[in-house]
Amino acid sequence: MGSLANQRVWGWGRQPVGETELRRPERLRDLYAAVSGEGTALARGLGRSYGDASFNSAGTTILMERIDRYVDFDPSAGVVECEAGVTIDDLVRHFVPRGFFPPVVPGTKHVTMGGAIASDIHGKNHHKDGSLARHLLDFELLTASGDIVTCSRDENPDLFWATLGGMGLTGVVTTLRMQMTPVASAYVEVDIDRAPDLDRTLELFHESDENYRYSVAWVDGLAGGRSLGRSILMRGNPAPSGDGRGLDVKRRKERSVPKIFPAALLNRTSVKAFNTLYYRRHPRQARGAVQHYEPFFFPLDAARDWNRLYGKRGFTQYQCVLPYEGGRDGLARILEFVRRETRGSFLTVLKRFGPGEADSPLSFPMPGYTLAMDIPWRGAALESALERIDAIVIELGGRVYLTKDARLSAESLRAMYDRLDEWLAVKRRVDPESRFVSDLGQRLGLVA
């Protein structure tokens, strides 16, 4: 097992920054040794959570990317068993040619399955297929006592549900079994609609979303007035085979953003011009376009290290969900506030959620609208502005996605997640000495 000594680390938003001892186990036996040592520990996948969820400045951070072996695959049932360091990218490369696709994918393929469980990831199909929890059969969890515990809906169910969305603080997932989704091709049939404002965006969602497995809207976060909430809706279904549509895995050439990128190039003026062009270049309506899964599900992965576009100070992504009741007005208030009181959201995405996982205390999705906004980090001024958005979210009964969070307060967390005490009770039982710690966990009072 390699030890990389103390190093500076950060999440995808490039802030905040921590310092931690890094260890990189090569095999599961190395992982057991890393956890059995003195002090606190945290498992880290590929570091794609945006804030301080994936590192432990108080102790050791364990890099999981080499715990990435397949254990078994049952093609008749479509069930894969793998180690926690296997990524979404690994799964699509190995199983699309066999006619299977992961049941839920986030906006990037560079996510480990351990991280996916810690976040209970959701995707463009939540309104149809729910979050990862719905498709996970069971997993093995390395606990603070050094025991390997099987967790499922029937075996240790409280630990199963506390780990899904539990941000890696209940233990380390070692292996898992998941139900894959059969597909006839590697393509998606996509319908596009251009909506002139927020009301039309939401009308289109509600009028026809049930006809589509996948649904998402790009929103012009800098448009105001009568154009507030104008969007491009992209909705699709798995494409059948034929007409050149096979089970091919196309590897796009990923272009890299320089380590030192002049952040001044990405500013309100340039982004507003881009947004206007992007909005106008799409037709009012287009039907039946065929896209490979890569650009449809993972458009930003075409630019490796695209987070560097925000410069050394980085950015934060604020993602919240608002219940349908009051959600329209809440979205309008938040979009207008961000447009007026910050430098603006340079990338804004809106989706609809279906029912959440009622048994999971910290799982993020709930029925409603989920809004994600990428905002350049500007210190205390932005911090104050986001606290005011927190107040709107709490007022409407919504919550913030911890995987994207870098600055929420413990008080706001408790107001958003009304079953927090249930999760804390499981944490205290399986990890009474708080061996599993993250900077996020300390900030939010999730660890003692």
Image (cartoon, rainbow, N blue to C red):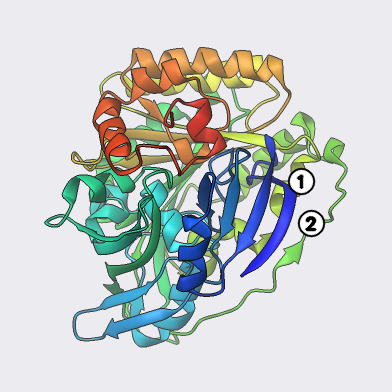
Amino acid type for the residue under numbered disc 1: Leu
Residue 83, placed above or below residue 244 = above
* In the image, farthest residue toward the front: 38
- Secondary structure beneath label 1: helix
- Give the residue type that dot 2 points to: Val
Q: Is residue 232 left or right of residue 425?
A: right
Single out the residue that lies furthest toward the left: 154
Q: Where's the C terminus, which quadrant?
A: top left
Q: Nearer the viewer, residue 185 or 318?
A: 318
Q: Is residue 247 above or below residue 155?
A: below
x, y percent for residue 191: 40, 57
Q: Residues within 10 Å of mark 1 (few under 14, many from 20)?
A: many
User: Percent position (x, y) of residue 362?
Assistant: 32, 36
Earlier in the chain: of badge 2 and badge 1, it is: 2
Front residue of 71/90: it is: 71
Q: Residue at x 65, y 63 (%)?
A: 302
The N terminus - image quarter: bottom right
274 vs 326: above or below = below
Vertical placement of 129 versus 385: above or below?
Answer: below
Is residue 236 visible in the rendered image? The answer is yes
- Residue 369 drawn at (x, y percent): 35, 33
Q: In this image, 331 relative to 295: left or right?
A: left
296 or 81, nearer to the observer: 81
Q: Are marks 2 and 1 in contact (CB under 8 Å)?
A: yes
Q: Residue at x 36, y 44 (%)?
A: 165
Name the secondary structure under disc 2.
Answer: loop
14 vs 82, nearest the viewer: 82
Disc marking residue 257: 2
Residue under label 1, please give it: 309
Q: Residue at x 28, y 34 (%)?
A: 423
